[in-house]
Image: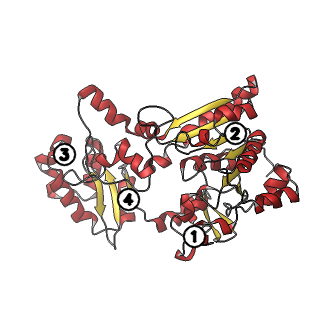
Amino acid sequence: MSKKQVFEGVKVAEFAWVAVGPQIGRTLAEHGATVVRIESHRRPDLLRLASPAKDFKPGIDRSAFFAMLNPNKYGISLDVSKPKGREIAKKLIKWADIVTESFAPGTMKRLGLDYEEAKKIKPDIIYVSTCMQGQYGPHAAHGAYGDQLAALSGFPALVGRPDGEPEMPPLAYTDWIAPWYVVTPLIGALLRRRKTGRGMYLEQSQYEAGVTFLAQGILDYTVNGRIMNRMANRDPYAAPHGVYPCKGEDRWCAIAVFTDEEWKAFCEVIGNPAWTKDAEFATLPGRKQNEDELDRLIAEWTVNCTAEEVMTLMQAKGIPAGVVYTIGDVFNCPQMKHREHFVYLEHPVIGRHAYHNEAIRFSKTPQDFYKAAPCIGEDNEYVYKEVLGLSDDEIADLLVEGVITTDADLPRGEASW
């Protein structure tokens, strides 16, 4: 790539695992940073065993979920529980500009690799810790993953039908919120170091990042004492507001009507049937009070049209509407293809497969994809020899001592899980 990238020349030692921490490293790597990911066969990243897997067969290097979060990175295998492993980790910290970790509070301190130790090795290091509920406080030691944290943040209380049980949002919702709250201050930390020569410790509570997405409900509670609850597909300020069945198998279209002008236009689109003139539907309060009947009547119209027809007709009249896409629809969407959202890379085990591009594009410093996610230990030779300057004999000794781990160190001796 001819144009310089935002993080070109920045070096990152990534001790992070699962979702949030690796996404931070992925963003840095896509924009030019050199990211070295530290793992161990004895305790591999949990996402390496997450579905979907190549050919539906689980294996430590077969997870597309893991691959999606880790392109453009170099991967090494290193057992930091061993003293010599920690010495190698310290060499990486000395080499790096940024260290990222996403373990439970106290883990890196017990290993002698926390920020206080890291800044002794490299005084201007920028060190990032991201975990469930932060590094301090009465609940800091509580362990969890994104699903549990989504529940703690309050999202399931808002998902589902009013008369039903709370439902988990898809995936571990907070895992897709928290990373971006770190990337921006990291840029600030790099700029500050350029001006002052000083490093920084950045500490994140993923819980708090998730809660910020419920600002409306928090404001309503603090001002009005009202607790937001489940509304299914409805909205307090719109009617109709829902997802309606369309022609075809499991095809749906979302429609939202907020204003009286939109309601008049909506009635025109569906042909002004007699029921649209009923007094109970003339105002938003009336439509909200009779929403069940309103939704039933609308569904009698939408079910005779394709979802694409409903969307096109509504949008032509200025009414917010959109087809409910399946994953297949998203993957084949002309807009996504035009913007080259899916980038293909060749993975050593999975083969050629798609990675997400970023949703934002930079004209002067574009991101780049050049390397599929690493198999565990894939870049040992390059990192240990070229980055850290170890000799062949030193590397051989570390392998014999189990400091540099191999497939033989997998739990239960299994090279493929």
- Comparing labels 1 and 2, the label whose residue is closer to the camera: 1
Judging by the rendered image, the residue that carries numbered circle 2 is: 98
Q: Secondary structure at mark 1?
A: helix
- Residue occupying the far left of the picture: 279
Q: Amino acid at mark 4?
A: Met
**Chain-order first, disc 4 or disc 3:** 3
Question: At 45% from the left edge and 46% from the top edge, which residue is drawn?
Answer: 143
Q: Residues within 10 Å of mark 3 (few under 14, many from 20)?
A: many
Judging by the rendered image, the residue that carries numbered circle 4 is: 311
Q: Secondary structure at mark 3?
A: helix
Q: Residues within 10 Å of mark 4 (few under 14, many from 20)?
A: many
Q: Secondary structure at mark 4?
A: helix
Residues 266 and 243: in front is 243
**Chain-order first, disc 2 or disc 3:** 2
- Comparing labels 2 and 3, the label whose residue is closer to the camera: 2
Question: At 65% from the left edge and 31% from the top edge, which residue is drawn?
Answer: 116
Judging by the rendered image, the residue that carries numbered circle 1 is: 412
**Residue 288: image tag:** 3
Coordinates of residue 73 in the picture (x, y in percent): 70, 54
Examine the rendered structure and indicate whether residue 26 appears above or below residue 120.
below
Q: What distance separates the C-alpha of mark 1 from that of mark 2?
A: 34 Å
**Chain-order first, disc 1 or disc 2:** 2
Question: At 43% from the left edge and 41% from the top edge, which residue is drawn?
Answer: 210
Residue 365 visible somewhere in the drawing: no
